Structure formats: structure tokens, C-alpha cells
Amino acid sequence: MYKTIVVTDQAETPSLDLNVISFDQYLEDYPKLGEPRTRIINLCDTEHYLSRGYYCSLLAESRQHRVLPSVNTINDLRDQDEAEQSLRPLLPKAAGVLEAPLELHIFFGWVPQEDWKKVARSLFEQYASPYLRATLSRGENGCEVKLERGNLSTLTATELSVFYDRLREFTQQVWRNRSRRQHRWDMAILYNSEEATAPSDADAIKRFVKAASKVGIEAEVLRSDQLKHLSQYDALFIRETTSIDHATYRLSRKGEKEGLVVMDDATSIMRCCNKIFLHDAFSYNKVSAPGTMVVSNRSAKELHRIEARFDYPMVLKMPESSFSIGVYKVEDRAALEEKLGLMFKESALALVQEYLYTDYDWRIGVLNGRAIYACKYFMARDHWQIYNHASSRKSTQSGGFETIPTFEAPRAVLDAALKASAIIGNGLYGVDLKQKGNHVYVIEVNDNPSIEHGVEDAYLGDELYMMIMQEFVDRLERRGRS
């Protein structure tokens, strides 16, 4: 459980039912031997570099205390050019027609103006600080914003009273102790139960939570719109289909900046989500893969070049796709031209790949360079893919599966999976492969792979979930020693 300490440079503070100390006390009395995990709310003025407020956050991080604001946030707020670029997408278009500049006093992500509450939350999520002062005005390019960390000494008595009310609410509702049981770490599991093709089902999520508890992690299952305050967690486990232009990537990146152990990390998401990267990386690293071309138009010359290399049928793939969505098989030139036309409306590039039919695809689960499960995914009935999204019958939407011990999978399949995943990183991956005779071809490496109860865990059972949660523990331990 966490203990919360408020560090202030204010001469007087009201009774907050919190542990409020001065900067000098924090400097002299901490860290204490055997103290519990500690969160610091730094209310000292951080306007100047190497000020007391700056050192308060810096010392908190060196003492492995979770602190608001972080040193990175303090530095980011000082770089206004970068701040304006990152904040502009958060502002409503209506703000561009402001008749006069508007100043918002944002207390822990809250403002009294109803019309600006969403903007205030967004600004706080981007630059988490107890008191932010945002000035919005109309400029040549629409709304312009100046964001800076507010100084409590500039607030009126009434405004200070409101600020301290928000502080109480923030510590009670956000930085609260969420469990009666003692856990060493807190984890957020990002999961959307309404997602049609979620990488884990509800039963698997329950088993992840149970496994986490057994190794000392309290896991909380949240949707992306509920995950507003990443800084209260030690780890983020993403169990929602990832994409670059999506909350999953943004939360992964933000979690890394906040010092969380994140799986999948943002780099893995970026690399796995784009098949152009995978094709190029496989070629450069000599990973055996189906013949592939990257194309940028559907001119007669380009179509002829494609046909000179591949026979029909061919496979077309969108650079960013998952669960066989955005993947097409074309039987002739007319279909090739038609599908490329559809794809170029969404992407500047597309992939054309030789068609390799097999009765099943291999999926090897890899965690930190180690194979942890092996599955055969059979093709959907009367279809050439594992998933048949055109089928109206649930029984024919996907094929069957067979889960086997990794030591029973062919050595060549395991070796190819480990080689391909090593290009991506040291996270949790699902490597898709085809085997034709003695040849093994890597189709792609998936971040955030499918782990469903009764499928991928069919051989290992609960041990699969324990292995993944133990990896989080190992990384959290290493983080603590660094």
C-alpha cells in the first residue's frame, strides 16, 4: 500500500487529514528505514530550475517515491514550443473563435467551468501537475495555448480553499489504497470487454488478475477511458488490440515516460503494427518469409511488375491490420487492381505477397526471448485464412486449434520464431509461421498476442498466466535496483 506525503513551501496550510511536511523536513527526514511505498505531492514552487520544488521532485525520484509532478513534467512545462505542439490536438475547435483570452486554473485536472472540464482533464493527463495555469487565445492557426505550472502563492484565499478541496478528493479517489490485502506493486490491465476481437477473453483476464495477486501485484482491469492517472501504477499490461493511432499506443508511451513497466512497450507496438517494417526487418536480418513486394500505385506498369514476380492467387495486406482484417486474396488482374485501389485510399503503401496455403498456421508465444506456448491454428471452414470475417455463421468464423508443449513443436519453427521476435524486442509476442515441407516461413510477429482461456493456455493452464506475471515481477525488481 502507498503512503501519501504532501510537501509544501506554504507558510500555512489548512487541516487536510494528510501528512503535510515542509521541504526541509522532506530533505532531512527521508528516506526512512523500512518505510512503506510512498507517493509525494509536491506543492513547492518549481518555476525555476534547481529550485526547492525542482529538487523535491528530483529527490523523490531518487528515493523511489512516486511524485507529482515528475521531473520530466517540470522540464516539459518549461519547453513551451514543444508543449504547444503536443497540446494543440487536445483543444476543441470552438476555442479558435475565442473573443478574448481565457485563463483556466486547473487543480488536479479539474476546473469549475463545465464547458472546459474535458480540456482540463486532457491537459492534466499530458502534464500531470497539481496546479496548472492555461491561457487560451485565438491565433493565426486557430487556438493557441500557453501552459505553465501555477504558483499557489498567487491564489486568493477562496481559490486556495478550492485547491485544497481538490487535493483531498484527488488523494482519496485517485491515489487511494485500493485493497485491504498487502501487495508490493499495482498494475493496470487495459482491457475492453466490448471489443469484438480482443486478444484475451474475460476468463483469461480473471486468470491474469489471480496470477498477479499470487506474485504480489494488485491488478485492476480498466478501459482506456478509465485509465486517467497512470502515475498511481507500477505496471501497465495491455490486453486490448493495439494500433499506432490509438489510445493503446499513447498509454504505452505515456507509461514508459512515467517509469512504469509496460507490456507491450511502445516500440514493440510500432514495429509489430506495421507490416512494412516487418517485411524490411525480415529481409535485412535474413528471416525466412514469404516473397513480398511493397507497392505504391496500381498503374499498368506496377501491375505488370507484380505479375512478373508472383503467380495468381496473390495475397494483399494493409500495412496496419490484425486478426486477418485488411488481408485479401486476389485471383486475377481485375481483382488485384480493385483491391489495391481500395487499399490506397487508406494507405500510401500496400504489400503484395506470394500465396502459401497450409492447413494450419503455427503460433509460437514468445516472452523475453523464450517460447512459452505453441499452437496450431487451423483454417476456417471453406476458407483460406484462420478467420473468415465474411461468414455470417459463428461456427465458421474461425478454424479449430491444437495447443501442444513447446518441446513438441518442430525445432525449425521454434528457431524461426525466436529469431523473428528478437528483431522486435524482449516483450510478449505471438509469432505466426507457415511450414511447407522442410521450409518454415515467418508471416508476422504480433505484439499483444491472443491469450484466451481454453486455447493458448490449453496445455500450461494457469502456469501460463503465472509465467507472464512473474516476468513483470522480475522487471519491477530490476527497476527497483536500478
Image: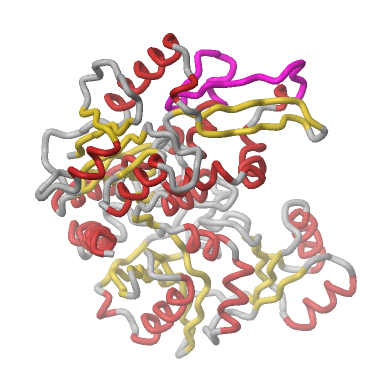
State left or right for residue 36 relative to residue 434: left
Q: State the residue in front, 75 or 265.
A: 75
Please say if 322 is above or below 286. above
Q: State the residue in front, 250 or 27.
A: 27
Q: Quadrant of the C terminus?
A: bottom left
Q: Where is residue 449, by image quadrant? A: bottom left
Query: For the point 34% across and 43% down, which residue is it?
Result: 56
Q: State the residue in front, 145 or 172.
A: 145
Query: In the image, residue 126 lies at what x, y percent?
Result: 51, 39
Q: Is residue 3 magenta?
A: no
Q: Quadrant of the N terminus?
A: top left
Query: In the image, residue 209 lies at what x, y percent?
Result: 23, 46
Look at the image and give the residue range highlighted in magenta: 96-119
How is the rendered protein coloured?
secondary structure
> Farthest top residue?
158
Please say if 67 is above or below 451. above
Q: How many marks?
A: 0
Q: Is residue 105 magenta?
A: yes
Q: Is residue 213 visible?
A: yes
Query: For the point 82% across and 65% down, which residue is it?
Result: 297
Query: In the image, residue 168 lies at what x, y percent?
Result: 30, 21
Query: For the point 47% across and 28% down, which residue is it?
Result: 151
